[in-house]
Amino acid sequence: MKSRVIKVGSVLIGGGNPVLIQSMTNTDTRDAAATVQQILELENAGCEIIRCAVPDEKAAYALKEIKDKIHIPLIADIHFDYKLAVKSVEYGADCIRINPGNLGGFERLKIVTDAVKAAGAAIRVGINSGSLEKDILANHGVTAAAIVKSALRNIRYLYDLNFDNFKVSLKSSSVPMTIQAYKLFAEQDNSPLHVGVTEAGTLFSGTIKSAVGIGSILSLGLGDTLRVSLTGEPVEEVKTGWQIVSALDLRRKGPEIISCPTCGRTEINLIDLAQKVENMLQCSKSLVTVAVMGCAVNGPGEAREADYGIAGGTCQGLIFKKGTILKKVNEDILLKEFENILKEDGII
């Protein structure tokens, strides 16, 4: 079932539109200059929607300056204080992230929804396993069913207010629970889905949990935006997000690098070579495949099938382009020769 389409700033979400990569700033939102600088860095890395924490009115007011200097939709992250939600859309937020159930009642939610409607903005209904309603916890515990029950209850308030320009997230730090929650919810409602594994962890463990969780959900045909939540620099969230959608052939941003894990047959310094090729291609936007292979078993075949490739031999390597061997060169000049070819072809 396709999700319905909503509008967040300049982008359309849901209904088969591309899955968009989102992140969240970790600067003090009240420091507009620092926040803008980080968002521009994230834009350069491929971030397509950005969320900022709004803990007080000063942070809400800073959104106006931030919005004027960035180029992607801006989401204000709101908890508990409905007045901050109203202020945020007044100051330019394209979307607010709220849990309708913790704003203090239906009347306050109506005030927020009216402000969002007037501004032409959107809402993300953010449901988290760590902040479920007491009655739901009492009846269901912390489960996927409980997350979904909370989500359905909260979006019903918005439907009752004749508002449907919203998307929904159903997050847990448990990967199986998160996957199950998205599956259960999608069987009952067609709202666009923001996908993520909350509090996933540090760069290493968080990347793995996010790739498994987000990747599993996307592979089911669910998910319209995503955020990889990592304890670290937000740029890493964006890079990981793009790797996930690229691995599933949903979207591509820049080259795809194929490299072998190395083994006892490898006779060149492949690990160093592959890392340097990846660094070389980091800023490229060309949608090419580049293979860096280390031995005669799979190397020539993989390199030949890629747009560009290196197949290592004994202290030397073959350079391929579109299935054709261009040259055989010694290991000490292999990287430089490969770089020259990529430059000549405008890949880097």
Image (cartoon, rainbow, N blue to C red):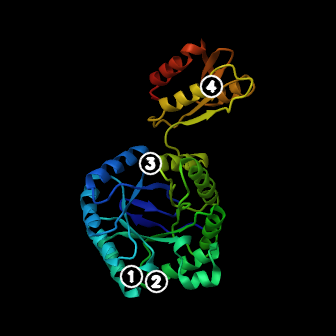
Reading the image, the residue beneath label 2 is 157
Q: Earlier in the sequence, mark 3 or mark 1?
A: 1
Does residue 282 appear left or right of residue 68 in this picture?
Answer: right
Residue at 63 percent of width and 17 percent of height: 317
As drawn, the label of residue 109 is 1
Q: In this view, does 271 lie above or below 109?
A: above
Secondary structure category for the residue under label 4: helix
Amino acid type, residue under disc 4 in the picture: Leu
Does residue 140 appear left or right of residue 118 in this picture?
Answer: right
Amino acid type, residue under disc 1 in the picture: Leu
- Residue 144 place in picture, x, y as percent: 63, 72
Reading the image, the residue beneath label 4 is 270
Structural distance between the alpha carbons of marks 1 and 4: 58 Å
Structural distance between the alpha carbons of marks 3 and 1: 33 Å
Structural distance between the alpha carbons of marks 4 and 3: 28 Å
Q: From the viewer's perspective, is the residue at label 3 or at label 1 nearer?
A: 3
- Residue 291 place in picture, x, y as percent: 61, 30
Reading the image, the residue beneath label 3 is 233
Q: Tell me the quarter of the image containing the C terminus.
A: top left
Secondary structure category for the residue under label 1: helix
Q: Which of marks 4 and 3 is nearer the N terminus?
A: 3
Secondary structure category for the residue under label 3: loop
Q: Which of marks 3 and 2 is nearer the N terminus?
A: 2
Q: Earlier in the sequence, mark 2 or mark 4?
A: 2
Amino acid type, residue under disc 2 in the picture: Tyr
Residue at 39 percent of width and 48 percent of height: 42
As drawn, the label of residue 213 is none
Does residue 105 appear left or right of residue 88 in this picture?
Answer: right
